[in-house]
Image (spheres, rainbow, N blue to C red):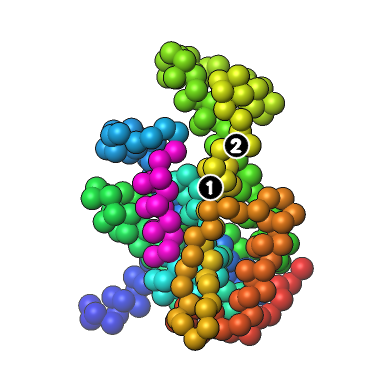
């Protein structure tokens, strides 16, 4: 059988699950590190617990890389072992074919972090298809709230470990403890949650900065605002994207999705 015939015969099996994000939907990619708890425990000795600036900075550098690897990303966000990328509303790289975004972004993140660490690391990727700006704002509020929960839980766990509890004992002690109880536990250990660094409590944003005629650069924001102020902050990133996006891709006209 000729090669062209084989291609026509077998290509449908390869692309049967292909789908594209419809025009008008906002795209946010979320990447998560695989097995990072084990990674930091076994292959990164000497880390400061529960947060280490070296890991934070590697996540920032990985996020910055993803914002410049061929897509038009108007806002990046990272907390713990995850990264979220908000694409330009008119992004149309690869015809908005999802498998391209999943595979390329996961590969780029894995490669960049592995180079920074000097050890093989893997990320996965998914893309949220959000119908309007309000859902975009809610998405990033959700991830920032998750950062706060993770921060509180991590500091409580390590406070218990510092007090002599084993891994199992510390985990069990936190299992049925709600937010108020965790705040009280942390306070009794000598730490006020409100005094912890904002980048631990809120995560880190990465924004494009335009200074005069200089080429736009990406700047990390380690002091993200809270609640309604953060909602306005995310909306501002989208409002700025009405100008030409910083990436190299071209954009299609926005068509509002069908309700």
Residue at 53% x, 83% y is 212
Give residue 49's position: percent from left, percent from top. Answer: 42, 32
132 or 189: which is nearer to us?
A: 189
220 or 131: which is nearer to us?
A: 220
- SS at circle 1: helix
Q: Which residue is mark 2?
A: 195
Residue at 69% x, 66% y is 235
Q: Which residues are magenta?
A: 51-65
**Left or right placement of residue 214 versus residue 89 in this view:** left
Q: Which residue is mark 1?
A: 199
The prevailing secondary structure element of the residues shown in magenta is helix
Q: Please say if 178 is above or below 141.
A: above
Residue 229 occupies quadrant: bottom right
- Between the C-alphas of marks 2 and 1, the distance is 11 Å
- Residue 13 in sight in this render: no
Query: In front of the other: label 2 or label 1?
Result: 2
- SS at circle 2: helix
Give residue 257's position: percent from left, percent from top. Answer: 70, 73
- Residue 230 in sight in this render: yes
Give residue 255's position: percent from left, percent from top. Answer: 68, 80
């Amino acid at each position: 059988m000729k090669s062209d015939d084989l291609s026509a015969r077998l290509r449908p099996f390869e692309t049967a699950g292909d789908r594209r994000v419809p025009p008008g939907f906002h795209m946010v990619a979320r990447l998560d590190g695989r097995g990072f708890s084990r990674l930091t425990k076994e292959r990164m000795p000497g880390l400061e617990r529960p947060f280490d600036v070296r890991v934070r900075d590697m996540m920032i550098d990985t996020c910055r890389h993803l914002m410049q690897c061929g897509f038009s990303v108007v806002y990046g966000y990272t907390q713990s072992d995850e990264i979220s990328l908000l694409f330009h509303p008119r992004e149309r790289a690869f015809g908005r074919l999802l498998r391209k975004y999943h595979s390329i972004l996961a590969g780029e993140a894995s490669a960049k972090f592995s180079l920074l660490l000097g050890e093989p690391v893997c990320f996965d990727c998914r893309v949220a298809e959000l119908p309007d700006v309000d859902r975009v704002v809610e998405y990033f509020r959700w991830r920032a709230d998750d950062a706060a929960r993770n921060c509180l839980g991590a500091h409580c766990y390590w406070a218990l470990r510092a007090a002599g509890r084993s891994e199992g004992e510390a985990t069990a002690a936190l299992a049925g403890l709600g937010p108020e109880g965790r705040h009280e536990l942390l306070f009794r250990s000598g730490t006020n949650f409100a005094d912890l660094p904002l980048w631990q409590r809120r995560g880190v944003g990465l924004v494009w900065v335009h200074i005069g005629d200089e080429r736009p650069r990406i700047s990390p924001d380690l002091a993200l605002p809270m609640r309604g102020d953060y909602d306005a902050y995310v909306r501002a990133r989208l409002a700025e994207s009405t100008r030409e996006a910083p990436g190299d891709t071209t954009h299609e006209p926005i068509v509002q999705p069908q309700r």
